[in-house]
Amino acid sequence: MNSPITIGISACLFGKNTRYDGGHRHQPQLIEALRQFVTLLPLCPEVECGLGIPREPMRLEGDPEGPRLLTITSRRDLTAPMLAWAAQRLEAFAKEGLQGLILKSRSPSCGARVAVHGEGEAAFSPGLFVRACQERFPDLPIANEEELCDPARLAAFLKRVTDHK
Ligand code: SF4
């Protein structure tokens, strides 16, 4: 039986071929451990905001306090479609009672700490979707797959998720 506690997870970690190169970053051990306690809802911000598979790689650029999402070669600015999709999806999350998110590290959309390319010193920001999540739900437990390799951190995350109202 599915757990009534639902958390979102980057679709590529769940095993879906949603990455820009058509691949995935499946984390079978983590998925198996999580499924004992929660229902997992896979999502991919880049695919769901209308970008295809495969797609041109992108990165964050500009002001680290408000970076833009640009494709690296063709210089297409994807900031507006990503933020518009995120705003809509996060309202749906609010209605669905989502209790946590596990998002792929290092992605310009899903990563918690991503390089922002510019002319000055090295700078970092959350990916655009993570930033939107943090602004809409400041208390929502959010983790990435690298942190959750550690059993103690996984247990602590699950406790935060189950305590989250
Ligand atoms: S990291 Fe995020 S945006 Fe990239 S493929 Fe995975 S779910 Fe999609």
Image (spheres, rainbow, N blue to C red):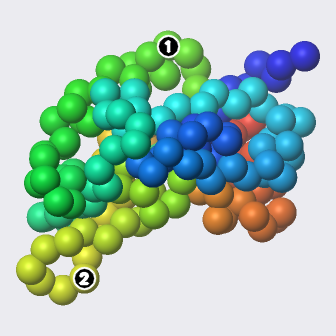
State yes or no: discs 1 and 2 in contact (Cβ < 8 Å).
no
86 above or below 140? above
User: At which x and y percent is residue 146?
Assistant: 64, 65
Residue 120 seen in this snapshot: yes
Label number found at residue 127:
none
Q: Position of residue 130 (x, y in %)?
A: 40, 47
Residue under the point 32% across and 55% down: 57
123 on left or right of 23: left
For this view, does 84 lie left or right of residue 39?
left
Q: Secondary structure at mark 1?
A: helix
Beta carbon of the mark 2 residue lies under 8 A of ligand 1: no
Residue at x-position 57% and y-position 40%: 17
Circle 2: residue type? Ala
The residue at which mark 2 appears reads as 122
In the image, is 92 to the left or to the right of 87? right
**Left or right, residue 62 beside residue 106:** left
Work out which residue is located at the far top of the displayed protein and give it.
95
Image quarter of the C terminus: top right
The kind of residue tagged 1 is Lys
Q: Residue at x 51, y 40 (%)?
A: 18
Task: Name the residue at 19% across, 42% down.
Answer: 78
Q: Secondary structure at mark 2?
A: loop
Residue wearing tag 1: 95
Q: Picture quarter containing residue 60?
A: bottom left
- Image coordinates of residue 152 in percent, x first then y, are 81, 64
Asked if 95 appears above or below 70 in the picture, the reply is above
Q: Position of residue 40 (x, y in %)?
A: 70, 31
Q: CA distance from mark 1 to mark 2?
A: 38 Å
- Dot 1 or dot 2: first in sequence order is 1
Q: Is residue 143 above or below residue 52?
A: below
Q: Nearer the viewer, residue 69 or 24?
A: 24
